[in-house]
Structures are given as C-alpha cells and as structure tokens.
Amino acid sequence: MSTGLFTPRPGAAPLWRQVCAQASMESRLMLRNGEQLLLAVVIPVMVLIGGVEGAAHLDLSLSHRPIDEFAPGVLALAVMSTAFTSLAIATGFERRYGVIKRLGSSPLPRSGLLLGKVGALLLVELLQILVISVVALVMGWEPHPSLLAALVVIVAGTAAFASLGLFVAGVLRAEATLAAANLVYLLLMAGGAVVLPSSAYGAFGGVTRFLPSGALGDGLRRAFWSGEVPWSSLLVLVVWAGAGAALTARTFKWE
C-alpha cells in the first residue's frame, strides 16, 4: 500500500506566515501587560482630556482650539510610547530571559523577528489611534486631514523611535533599559514638543523641531490641520531612523 500521502515533509512555514505569527504573538503580549497597556492607551487618553481641560483655564497661546492642538499631539505621544518605550522595555527583558536567543534557534530569521516586532507595533498603534480618535471626536475634534500624509508621518515616526528603542535595549541591562526608556519618555512628553507644538516652547522651539518627538508631533499637526505633507518633519524622522538603525546594527546584543 502506498504511503506517499502520509510521508512527513518537514520544513519551515513561508516567511510571511512566520512574520504574521510573530507579530500576532508580540501584539497580544504587549496588550496583556498592564504597564504596556497603561503606556499605550491610558496615559495618552488622560493627557488628551487633562490637556484640553487645562487649556480652558490657562493661557497657552495656542493657534488653534485646544482639542485641535492636543489631538494630533496625543496621537504622536501614543506612537512614541509604543514604538520607543514599550518596545525598549519588552526587548530588554526578552534579552535578559533569553527569549531572543531561543528565537534565534527557530526557523524565524533575524529579519523576520524584526519585521514581526514592527508589525506588532503597527497593530497596537492602530488600536491606539482608533481609541484616541474616538475620544477626541467626542470632545469636539474637527480635523481636516490628509490621511496619506498622516500615515507616512506615523510610519516614519514608528521607524525612528523603534530603531532608537532597540538601540537602548541592545546596549543596556534590562533594569537600566526600564529606567532610561521611562525617563526619556517623560522628558520628551514634557519638553520634546510632542503634545504641544514647537512654537509653544519659545526660543527652545527651534531645537525641538530637530528632535524625533518634535518632528513627529509637528508633522502630525500639519497633516491634520491643513492636509499638507510635512516634508521637513519627515526628513528629520528619516535621519533619526537611519541613525538609530545604524547604531542598533553595530551595538545590539542578542543575549
């Protein structure tokens, strides 16, 4: 009797299926973690509501209505929290516990692992954008966006912050990565022109435009205010992404 139909054919799944499986697992792990969920959704929504309510009692010299100023900035903050802080912390502890080393022995190549992480970031960011946009629209947000321009800025911002997050996670111990990622997140949220425009920082605003946080925040504001493609902000983000990728490639340690 022929057994050809039952002969095992061992081998790895196609790369795209491996990447999709890795992205699905990574995104589920991020959303199951209470700290990651806090960074991804809760803090940005609190900043949005608190910023709009606070602007009603403070003179911030904003050029648009508070909700129209804060909504794009909080979307930028959400991207930064996921692509930089969450990714850096998760990768740092994966290195500590040998998760990445064990994945290296699987059929999933390094490029597939990185693509899976980027895919997970984009999935989580999609959820963040949906939640924050709904809250902002309920609060009276009236955007005039170019969705293509906003998408390009978000992808460029994700690439810039992800490369920097992997650089931090690849050179520091897990506990140091946790402290450094949270510290940088707080500093950029307060003074990096991510939530408020660079013009709100006076003379220091000229510096914030060249930070990845300022470029991401200002780029999304232009995309949502006037529907323009923010070429200068995109250039800054691309430079940061290239620099971060080069540093990560030279210094990242897998264990």
Image (spheres, rainbow, N blue to C red):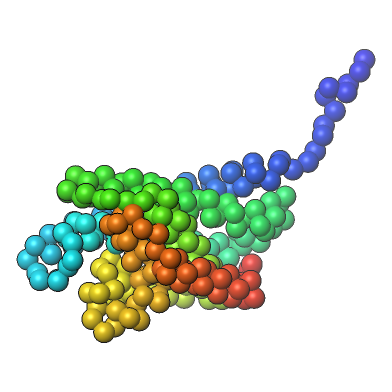
Judge whether residue 170 can be spotted in this image: no
Q: Nearer the viewer, residue 215 or 247?
A: 215
Name the outermost residue toward the right: 1
The residue positioned 58% from the left and 65% from the top of the image is 95
In the picture as drawn, the residue positioned furthest to the top comes out as 1
- The answer, for residue 203, to whether it is visible in the render is yes
| Rendering quarter of residue 196 | bottom left
Residue farthest to the bottom? 203
Residue 148 higher or lower than 251, as above or below? above
Quadrant placement of the C terminus: bottom right
Residue 172 lies, with reference to residue 22, above or below; the image says below
Instruction: Name the spot of residue 9 as percent of width and height, x first.
Output: 82, 34
Q: In screen coordinates, is 179 left or right of 201?
A: right
Residue 51, given in percent of the width and then of the height, sits at 18, 62
Viewer-closest of 248 and 194: 194
Residue 151 position within the rendered picture, expressed as x and y whole percent measured from the top left: 43, 53
Q: How many marks?
A: 0
Residue at the image position 33 percent from the left and 81 percent from the top: 206
Give residue 229's quadrant in the image. bottom left
Location of residue 182 in the rendering, given as x and y in whole percent from the top left corner: 38, 70
Left or right, 100 with reference to 132: right
Q: Observer-nearest residue: 217 or 187?
A: 217
Residue at 21% in and 49% down? 142
In this view, 136 is above or below 10: below
Give the residue drawn at x 9%, y 69%: 58
Quadrant where the N terminus sits is: top right
